[in-house]
């Protein structure tokens, strides 16, 4: 009985530790840092080489209404490179809001510069394939 109690205590301690890490203020969506924690972010840059201002998010985004972190520059139709830091989830970018228009996928973990691929300054939404509201 006392052994079972020890095991339960260990499990509870483990959960508490995990919650403390999840609440770490240094990591998170839209903090200006492209991170792989919490499942991995997708990061949008308005430069072609993954530098400068970034829009980093853990989530699908049906309309590009935001601005690059710390700037007044809208992300809509200004994205030139992207980095999918979710290692195992495809993200699809769309030329129009609500996951419509021309579409191109980016596999987990990859970086792409869209300048030479005909998708420069066109993206207006993106969707992680794990999101049930994504098309197909
Ligand atoms: Ca981040
Ligand atoms: Ca667009």
Image (cartoon, rainbow, N blue to C red):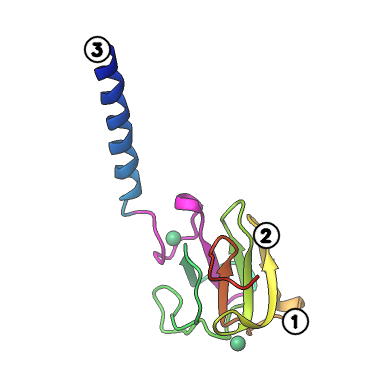
Q: Give the percent coordinates (x, y) of residue 70.
A: 39, 74
- Disc nearer the start of the sequence (2/3): 3
Q: Where are the magenta residues, as a range?
A: 26-47
Q: Give the percent coordinates (x, y) of residue 82.
A: 61, 68
Ligand 2 rendered quadrant: bottom right
| Pointer 1 with pointer 2, Cβ within 8 A | no
- The residue under label 2 is 107
Q: Secondary structure at mark 3?
A: loop
Classify 10 Å Cα crowding around label 1: few (below 14), some (14-19), many (20 and above). few
Q: Give the percent coordinates (x, y) of residue 124.
A: 57, 83
Say which quarter of the image contains residue 20: top left
Magenta region's main secondary structure? loop
Residue at mark 2 to residue at mark 3: CA–CA distance: 49 Å
Residue at 28 percent of width and 17 percent of height:
4
- The residue under label 1 is 118
User: Cβ(mark 1) to ligand 2 < 8 Å?
Assistant: no
Q: Give the percent coordinates (x, y) of residue 12.
A: 28, 31
The quadrant the C terminus occupies is bottom right
- Disc nearer the start of the sequence (3/1): 3
Residue at mark 1 to residue at mark 2: CA–CA distance: 18 Å
- The residue under label 3 is 1
Residue at 64 percent of width and 73 percent of height:
48
The quadrant the N terminus occupies is top left
Query: In the rendered view, would you say 21 is above or below 42?
Result: above
Q: Is residue 39 magenta?
A: yes
Marker count (numbered): 3
Say which quarter of the image contains residue 114: bottom right
């Amino acid at each position: 009985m006392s052994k079972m109690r020890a095991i339960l205590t260990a499990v509870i301690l483990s959960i508490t530790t995990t919650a403390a890490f999840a609440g770490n203020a240094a990591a998170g969506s839209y903090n200006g840092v492209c991170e792989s924690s919490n499942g991995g972010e997708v990061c949008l840059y308005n430069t072609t080489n993954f530098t400068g201002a970034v829009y980093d998010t853990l989530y699908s985004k049906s309309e590009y209404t935001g601005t690059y972190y710390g700037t007044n520059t809208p992300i809509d139709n200004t994205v030139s490179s992207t980095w999918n830091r979710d290692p195992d989830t495809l993200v699809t970018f769309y030329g129009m809001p609500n996951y419509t228009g021309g579409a191109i996928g980016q596999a987990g973990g990859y970086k792409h510069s869209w300048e030479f691929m005909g998708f420069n300054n066109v993206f207006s939404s993106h969707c992680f394939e794990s999101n049930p509201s994504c098309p197909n």
